[in-house]
C-alpha cells in the first residue's frame, strides 16, 4: 500500500543480437542466458517476450560482412532490416515496440561507432561523415519497420540529421530515442563480445562521455532535445544512478535507462558463485533504476524479471 516505486513487465525492454544464418542460438560466454540469434530463433525469443508482457525489443545486428562504410548498417537487406520485416509480419508480436539501435560499430572492421580516418598510428573519428551514414541507417531501419530509432553512436549533430532523414523518407511519426549522455564505460565490455564490436585500436573516449562529468551530461542532453530527441536513454544505469536522477528532475521527456552488459555479467558472476541471491538481487537492481527516475529499463534480465513479476 505504501510502496513508492513499482516494476512492471511493460516497462522492460529486452535486447536481441541478430546474426545471419538459420537455427543459430550461440550463447555469449560472459552473459549467461543471452544469445546471438538467427532471425528464426530471434522470432521465438520475441514471442516469449510478448507472452511475458514485455514492453519491447532493442535490436542489434551482427552483419555477415563488415566494411569501412558500414554498409550492413544501412543496406535494405541488412540483418536488422530483415529481422524488423519478419517481426512486423508476425501478429503475435504486435504488443512489442521494436526499437532499432542505430550505430556503426557492429558494421565496421575497426569497431568504432563512426568513420575513421587513419594516418600511420594517428587516427580520428570523423564526426560529420559518420553522421551522414548514421542518418541513412536510421531512415533504412524505419523503412524496414522500426517503431523507434535509438542512436547510440554519440556523434554530435546526429539527432537533427536523423530527424531530417526520417522526415524526408516519410517517417515523420517515428520517434528518436537518444542515448544522449552515454558514458565511455568499462561496463560495455561483455556487449562487445555479444555484438562483435570491440574497437580494434584506441577507445571511444573521443565521442563518449567522461564518467566524471554530470554537468556535461546535462549539456549533451540539452543539445539532443534541441535537435529533436523525443525520448532519452541513460546509460549505463547502476554506476550512474545520480545522473538518471538529475536528468529526471530536469527533463520531462520519457526517459529510460540501460542496465548494460557489464552490470548483468557481474551479477551473474556472483550468482554462479553463490555469493548473491539471484532473484532478490536482480529485482533490487531494477527497482533502484526505477527509483532513480527511469520510466523504462533496457535489461538482459527482462524475461527473468517479468517471470518474477508474473
Ligand atoms: C553501440 C552500443 C554499445 C552498447 C549499446 N550500443 C557498446 C559501446 O558503445 O561500446 C552497450 C550495451 C551494453 O553494454 O549492454 N555503440
Image (cartoon, rainbow, N blue to C red):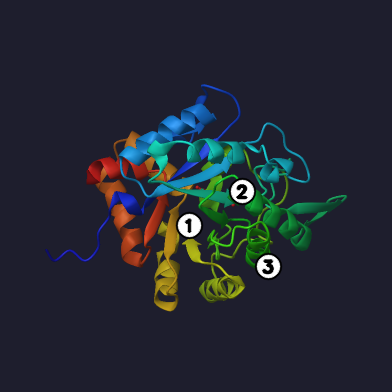
Nearer-the-camera pick, 135 or 236 = 135
Q: Position of residue 31 (x, y in %)?
A: 45, 37
Residue indicated by mark 2 = 143
**Left or right of 14, for residue 73:** right
Cβ of mark 1 under 8 Å from ligand 1: the answer is: yes
Evaluate if marks 2 and 3 touch, with contact meaning CB atoms under 8 Å apart: no
Give the alpha-carbon distance from disc 2 to disc 3, as whole Å. 22 Å
Residue indicated by mark 3 = 157
Q: Disc 2 or disc 1, which is closer to the eye? A: 2
Q: Secondary structure at mark 3?
A: loop
**Left or right of 283, for residue 118:** right
Q: Residue at x 36, y 40 (%)?
A: 50
Q: Secondary structure at mark 2?
A: helix
**Left or right of 194, for residue 110:** right
Choose the circle earlier in sequence order: 2 or 3.
2
Image height check: is 217 above or below 298? below
Q: Which label is found at residue 236?
A: 1
Q: Position of residue 279 (x, y in %)?
A: 26, 43
Give the alpha-carbon distance from disc 1 to disc 3, as whole Å. 22 Å
The residue sitting at the left extreme is 1
Give the alpha-carbon distance from disc 2 to disc 1, as whole Å. 29 Å
The residue sitting at the right extreme is 119
Amino acid at each position: 500500500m505504501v510502496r513508492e516505486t513499482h516494476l512492471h513487465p511493460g516497462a522492460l525492454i529486452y535486447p536481441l543480437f541478430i546474426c545471419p544464418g538459420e537455427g543459430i542460438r550461440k550463447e555469449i560466454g560472459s552473459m549467461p542466458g543471452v544469445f546471438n540469434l538467427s532471425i528464426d530463433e530471434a522470432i521465438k525469443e520475441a514471442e516469449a517476450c510478448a507472452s511475458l508482457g514485455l514492453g519491447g525489443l532493442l535490436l542489434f545486428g551482427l552483419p555477415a560482412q563488415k566494411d569501412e562504410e558500414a554498409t550492413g548498417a544501412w543496406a535494405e537487406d541488412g540483418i536488422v532490416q530483415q529481422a524488423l520485416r519478419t517481426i512486423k509480419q508476425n501478429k503475435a508480436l504486435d504488443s512489442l515496440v521494436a526499437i532499432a539501435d542505430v550505430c556503426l560499430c557492429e558494421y565496421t572492421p575497426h569497431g568504432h561507432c563512426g568513420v575513421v580516418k587513419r594516418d600511420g598510428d594517428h587516427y580520428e573519428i570523423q564526426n560529420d561523415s559518420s553522421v551522414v551514414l548514421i542518418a541513412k541507417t536510421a531512415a533504412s531501419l524505419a523503412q524496414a519497420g522500426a517503431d523507434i530509432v535509438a542512436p547510440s553512436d554519440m556523434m554530435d549533430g546526429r539527432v537533427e540529421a536523423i530527424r531530417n532523414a526520417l522526415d524526408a523518407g516519410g517517417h515523420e511519426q517515428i520517434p528518436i530515442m537518444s542515448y544522449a549522455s552515454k558514458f565511455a564505460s568499462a561496463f560495455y565490455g561483455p556487449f562487445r563480445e555479444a555484438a562483435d564490436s570491440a574497437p580494434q585500436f584506441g577507445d571511444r573516449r573521443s565521442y563518449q562521455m567522461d564518467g566524471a562529468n554530470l554537468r556535461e551530461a546535462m549539456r549533451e542532453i540539452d543539445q539532443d532535445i534541441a535537435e529533436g530527441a523525443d525520448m532519452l536513454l541513460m546509460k549505463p544505469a547502476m554506476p550512474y544512478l545520480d545522473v538518471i536522477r538529475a536528468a529526471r528532475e530536469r527533463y520531462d521527456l520519457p526517459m529510460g535507462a540501460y542496465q548494460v552488459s557489464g552490470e548483468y555479467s557481474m551479477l551473474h558472476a556472483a550468482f554462479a558463485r553463490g555469493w548473491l541471491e539471484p532473484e532478490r538481487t536482480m529485482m533490487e537492481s531494477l527497482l533502484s533504476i526505477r527509483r532513480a527516475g527511469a520510466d523504462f529499463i533496457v535489461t538482459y534480465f527482462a524475461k527473468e524479471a517479468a517471470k518474477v513479476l508474473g
